[in-house]
Image (cartoon, helix red, strand yellow):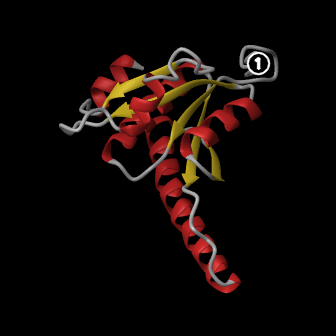
Amino acid sequence: MVAIRKSNEEGHHRKFLVVVDDTPECGRAIVYASKRAARTGGIVLLLFVIAPGNFQHWLGVEDIMRQEARDTADTILAKAAEKVRAAARTEPELVIREGHQSDEIISLIEDDADIAILVLAAGTSKEGPGPLVSSITGKSAGTFPIPTTIVPGNLDDDALDALA
């Protein structure tokens, strides 16, 4: 059970959570969340989840693999943070977690009572909106702890600005 959101209480700010990856549509979610946060006095929280690896090698190899995954996460988050700054001239919060993506999203929401909205962007390919969008809007939709905004992945910056 997720605690009551505190984003409207004094000293708190509404956070727009964006799960960051290297897909083109992720940039659409970042731009929308940034503009929306700027207009409402909120904060963009960028989450990168490192998938659990099969780190059952020698200790030295495990350490190298973990560090490479962390370096990749840092690089992708740095690029995403630049998009936030460019779109809204605001500083995002950055979080890296290791685990299964859906579990880590729920865990972060439980840990941070200021997170009020999850912003995702739908993929534009024929395969559908993407696995994360499908899982959030699928069987867990009725029990997901916060509202989710799904941004069409084909909108340009002007369209996103008009909607935010």
Going by the image, does 2 lie left or right of 131?
right
- Front one among 50 and 20: 50
* Residue 104 horizontal/vertical position (percent): 63, 42
The secondary element bearing badge 1 is classed as loop
Residue 160 lies in what quarter of the image? top left
Residue sitting at x 26%, y 29%: 155
Going by the image, does 76 lie left or right of 17?
left
- Amino acid at pointer 1: Lys
Residue at the far right in the pictured view: 10
Going by the image, does 120 lie left or right of 47?
left
- Front one among 27 and 3: 3
Tally of numbered tags: 1
Residue sitting at x 66%, y 78%: 63
Mark 1 nearby-residue class (10 Å; few <14, some 14–19, many ≥20): some
* Residue 19 horizontal/vertical position (percent): 51, 41
Residue at the far left in the pictured view: 126
* Residue 1 horizontal/vertical position (percent): 74, 21
Quarter in which the C terminus is drawn: top left
Q: Which residue is mark 1?
A: 6
Residue 144 lies in what quarter of the image? top right
- Front one among 70 and 77: 70
Residue sitting at x 46%, y 55%: 79
Indicate whether 150 appears above or below 82.
above
- Front one among 94 and 48: 48
Indicate whether 49 appears above or below 147.
below
Residue sitting at x 66%, y 23%: 14
